Amino acid sequence: IRAVALGADRPFLNIIQSDTIIKTWRLPNANELRWLVCTTMAYGGRGISYFTYWGPKEYNGLYVDGKPAPLVKDVAALNHEIARFGPALMGLNSVGVYHTAPLPYGGEAIPASAPVQILGDGEFVLGLFGQGAQTNAFMIVNRNYKNETETTVKINLHGRKLQELDRQTGKWTRAKGLSGKRTVKLKLAPGDGRLFRVTP
C-alpha cells in the first residue's frame, strides 16, 4: 500500500481492527493497538481510523449502541499521543522502511547503505524520513508488542545533533550532540515507536 501510494503521489491511512465483528477475530489489547499505529506511522501513513468505531453489540467495537466499550479508554489515550506526531510527520516524506530479522512477509532488510543502522538483537521497524531528497529523520518501532526492548542505533545522517519528538508537547526536544561513534542507546516499550531527527 505504501509503495502504491508513493507511486500515485497520494497519502494513505490504515484502518485498524478494534472489534470482533468476525467471531474468529480476537480484540487487540492496548500494546497491540500501539504497535499497529506506530508501524503505520513508520511506513509514512497519513491517517489512522478504527473498525468499528460505532456499531451494535454483536460487533463489539469501540462504541456499542452509543456506549463506550472498555477499549475506548486505551484508544483515546493513544490518539492523544499520536496527535503530537502529526505536525512533524506531515512535514516529512517517507524515504524508506525496513525491518530487522526475522523479516515479516514483504518486509525489506535494512541495507548496509542505510544512514541509520540498528545494532544488536531485537525486532524493529525502521522508517526513514526526509524533506526532498535528503533524509534527516527516522522512526524506530519495537515490533514486539509483548516486551520492552533496548537497542543501539548508529546514525550516519548529516548533522551533529539529535532531537526526539516529545509526545507530550509535540515539540522537538533540546538537541544533544552525537558522540564520535554516532551511536545512541534506545529503550522502547512494547509496540512503541520513537521519532528522531538530526540537525546541524
Image (cartoon, grey):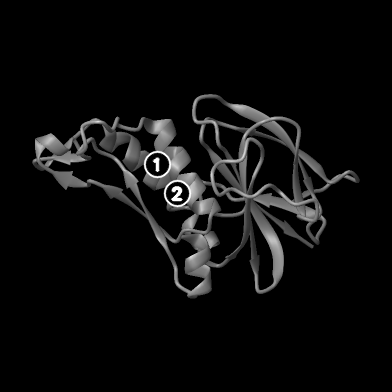
Specify few, some or many for label 1: CA neighbours under 10 Å numbering under 14, 14-19, or 20 or more: some
- Coordinates of residue 124 in the picture (x, y in percent): 62, 39
**Would you place residue 145 above or below residue 3 in this image?**
above
- The image position of residue 50, as x and y in percent, is 30, 48
Q: Is residue 168 among what the camera can see?
A: no
Q: Amino acid at mark 1?
A: Leu
Which label sits on residue 117?
none
Q: Quadrant of residue 76?
A: top left
Callout 1: helix, strand or loop?
A: helix
Left or right: where does residue 177 sit relative to residue 96? right
What is the three-letter code of the residue carrying label 2?
Ile
Q: Is residue 113 visible?
A: yes
Residue visible at 71% across and 30% down in the picture: 121
Badge 2 is on which residue?
Answer: 82
The residue most toward the top is 147
In the image, is residue 129 above or below residue 191? below
Residue shown at 25% from the left, 31% from the top? 24
- Residue 72, horizontal then vertical, whole percent: 26, 37
Rate crowding at label 2 as few (under 14), some (14 to 19) or many (20 or more) other CA atoms within 10 Å: some
Left or right for 165, reference 76: right
Q: Secondary structure at mark 2?
A: helix
Check if mark 2's residue and mark 1's residue have beta carbons within 8 Å. yes
Q: Tell me residue 16's x, y (percent).
A: 35, 46
- Left or right of 32? Residue 198 is right
Q: Could you tell me which residue is drawn at 66 percent across and 40 percent down?
A: 100
> Which residue, as the protein is rendered here, is positioned at the far right?
180
Residue drawn at point x = 74 percent, y = 60 percent? 199
Residue for badge 1: 78
C-alpha span from label 2 to label 1 = 6 Å
